[in-house]
Amino acid sequence: MIEEAQLEQVVGLVEREGVGTDTVQKLRALLPDLHFTFCMDDDIANAAPVRERQAFNVYLVDGRNHCLCFTQDVACATGLVLAEVEDD
């Protein structure tokens, strides 16, 4: 489960480092108990981000029941998706 402080730590690091695979690798090393995924924001449908920034959105994933699904509940989240927002 993810704590609110961890979520803010992740957002802060991505704001400083930028969104991408290198940042995801750093987060995996920093927070090994959490699952991190990187993708483009337009690859995600029917889910609302828990944090929105100009360059990226953060989504929470719940994997407790062997099937992954998006959630808005930090207490149920087992991972995060960092989704890059493309400039139009």
Image (cartoon, rainbow, N blue to C red):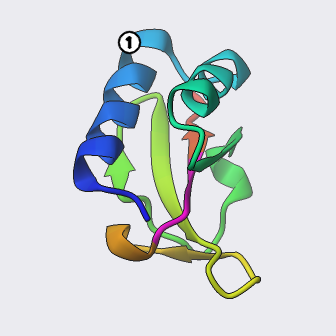
Tell me, yes or no, whether the highlighted magenta stretch contains residue 25.
no
Q: Amino acid at mark 1?
A: Arg
Mark 1: give few (<14), some (14-19) or many (20+) Cα within 10 Å. Answer: few
Q: Which residue is mark 1?
A: 16
Spot the residue most to the left. Answer: 5
Q: Quarter-wise, where is residue 24 in the image?
A: top right
Spot the residue most to the bottom. Answer: 65
Q: Image quadrant for the C terminus? A: top right
What residue sits 59% from the left and 20% below the top? 26
Q: Image quadrant for the N terminus? A: bottom left
Instruction: Give the answer, above or below, for where 47 lies relative to 37.
Output: below
What residue sits 43% from the left and 59% below the top? 49
Spot the residue most to the front. Answer: 33
Decide if residue 73 is in sight here.
no
Q: Which residues are magenta?
A: 77-81
Please state the horizontal and vertical placement of residue 13, each as a whole percent of the image.
39, 21
Please state the horizontal and vertical placement of residue 47, each as a whole percent of the image.
54, 71
How many badges with numbers are in the image? 1
